[in-house]
Image (cartoon, rainbow, N blue to C red):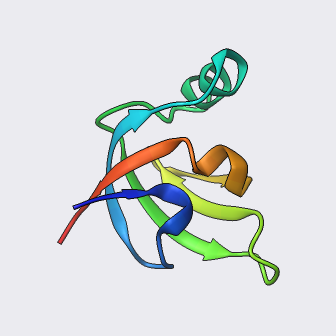
Amino acid sequence: MEKVLKDFKPGEQGIVKRVGGDGAVRRRLFDMGVTPGAPVKMRKVAPLGDPIEVTLRGYELTLRKAEAENVIAEISE
């Protein structure tokens, strides 16, 4: 099942399938390692819901929800 990264719950993990967004946002995500095929795991969500922290390629990455809504991932069972 595919899901937008901003909708992941803490502890959920998956594989990045697509990265959308306009040129600058998409380029920034690619530069941070958010590319198709990369494993991603939701670590935590800030108390007010923004930003979120994910583990990606062995490091912790903090994203705004506006950035995370451009990432579509396949949920791992």
| 27 w.r.t. 37: above or below | above
Number of on-image labels: 0
Along the line of sight, the residue nearer the viewer: 53 or 25: 25
State the residue at coordinates (74%, 75%). 49
Is residue 2 in view?
yes
Residue at screen point 62% across, 75% down: 44
Residue beneath the point at 76% across and 63% down: 51
Quadrant in the picture for residue 40:
bottom left
Q: Quadrant of the N terminus?
A: bottom left
Residue 5 x/y as whole percent: 49, 57
Task: Indicate left or right for 28 with 9 as reference.
Answer: right
Quadrant assignment for the C terminus: bottom left
Query: Where residue 33 appears, x then y in whole percent?
Result: 52, 32
Give how far across and how far down residue 48 sits, in percent. 82, 80
> On the image, which quarter does residue 50 sit in?
bottom right
Of all residues shown, which one is farthest toward the bottom? 47
User: In the rendered image, is residue 63 in sight?
Assistant: no
Q: Residue furthest right?
A: 48
Percent across and percent down for residue 74 are: 27, 54
Q: Is residue 9 above or below residue 17?
A: below
Question: Position of 69 compared to 38: left or right?
Answer: right
Asked whether, in this view, residue 18 is left or right of residue 31, the answer is left
Residue 13 sits in which quadrant?
A: bottom left
